[in-house]
Amino acid sequence: MRKIEGFGRFLLPPLVFDLQDAAREGPIIVLVANKSSCHAIIIPHRQPPTSIQLPTNFLKLMLLLHALR
């Protein structure tokens, strides 16, 4: 599949450059959470990403996840 033109990154995570380009109208926020830690990665347009450690409350995070679905 990846040998087809335009599909070279098929099913691979996006590159930071692509995310920064997509953040033209506002930053992209990526939440990375597990039972031991939680971080927000802020990806602005044309600036380096920033990682912010957030308080970890796995139960609240799971409730939020179910509410958003």
Image (cartoon, rainbow, N blue to C red):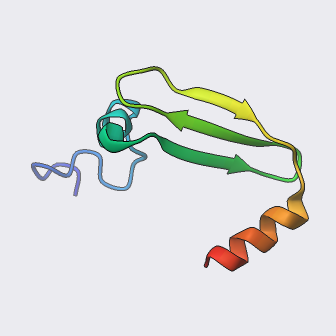
The percent coordinates of residue 42 (x first, y second) are 55, 35
| Relative to 58, 19 lies left or right | left
- Residue furthest toward the front? 25
Q: Nearer the viewer, residue 47 or 3?
A: 47
As drawn, 25 above or below 64: above
Q: Nearer the viewer, residue 1 or 11?
A: 11
| Relative to 17, 39 lies left or right | right
As drawn, 63 above or below 46: below
The percent coordinates of residue 51 (x first, y second) are 65, 29
Give the residue displayed 79% in from the left and 62% down from the top. 61
Quadrant in which residue 46 is drawn: top left
The percent coordinates of residue 1 (x first, y second) are 22, 58
Give the residue displayed 42% in from the left and 21% down from the top. 47
Give the residue displayed 71% in from the left and 32% down from the top. 52
| Relative to 52, 8 lies left or right | left
Q: Nearer the viewer, residue 9 or 14?
A: 14
